[in-house]
Image: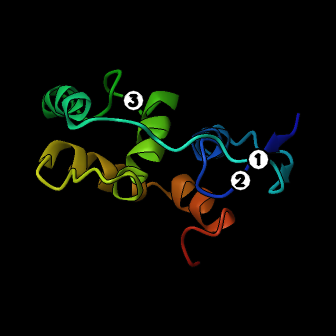
Amino acid sequence: MKLYYSPGACSLASHIVAREAAALQSLDARTSPCRKARGTLQNYALLERSLTARQWLLGERFSAADAYLFTVTNWAPHVGLDISRLPAITAFQQRVASRPRVQEALIAEGLLRG
């Protein structure tokens, strides 16, 4: 199995999940990037309520859904969304970013210096 990625694109979520599962086999950074995030603060308000009640989107354990939310939420500043007034999402982003496998994926994609 090969995992292709373009730094910072949708593939970051898959990259994180593969590293969390220790299943990453091969990478190719020359694929086309996916579309930019198109969200609204209303969508994030719903997520804010969910993440106020629990640490991860689907319960007690980190999942692929968390990796994807982390990825698209990282796009917020680039698409004009200010999520700084959403403390649960901000805390979520920090929790995900502090995970060792997430840091490995960010470094591998050139989004974080090692």
Q: Which residue is mark 3?
A: 61
Q: Residue at x 23, y 44 (%)?
A: 89
Q: How many marks?
A: 3
Closer mark to the observer between disc 2 and disc 1: 1
Q: Residue at x 24, y 29 (%)?
A: 47
Task: Give the quarter of the figure containing the N terminus.
Answer: top right
Q: With respect to residue 109, does 5 lie above or below?
A: above
How was this image coloured? rainbow
User: Residue 34 in the image: x percent, y percent?
Assistant: 64, 41
Q: Earlier in the sequence, mark 2 or mark 1?
A: 2
Q: CA distance from mark 2 to mark 1?
A: 7 Å
Disc 2 + disc 3, Cβ < 8 Å: no
Closer mark to the observer between disc 1 and disc 3: 1
Q: Which residue is mark 1?
A: 32
Disc 2 + disc 1, Cβ < 8 Å: yes
Residue type marked 2: Ser
The one of 21 and 40 positioned closer to us in this rendering: 40
Residue neighbourhood size for the residue with mark 3, other residues' Cα within 10 Å, grouped as few (<14), some (14–19), many (≥20): few
Where is residue 11, by image quadrant?
top right
Q: Residue at x 31, y 22 (%)?
A: 59
Q: Which residue is mark 2?
A: 6
Q: Earlier in the sequence, mark 1 or mark 3?
A: 1
* Mark 1 secondary-structure assignment: loop
User: Residue 113 in the image: x percent, y percent?
Assistant: 56, 78
Residue sitting farthest toward the top: 58
Residue type marked 1: Ser
Instruction: State left or right for residue 25 relative to residue 62.
Output: right
The one of 33 and 73 positioned closer to us in this rendering: 33
User: Residue 78 in the image: x percent, y percent?
Assistant: 41, 58
* Mark 2 secondary-structure assignment: loop
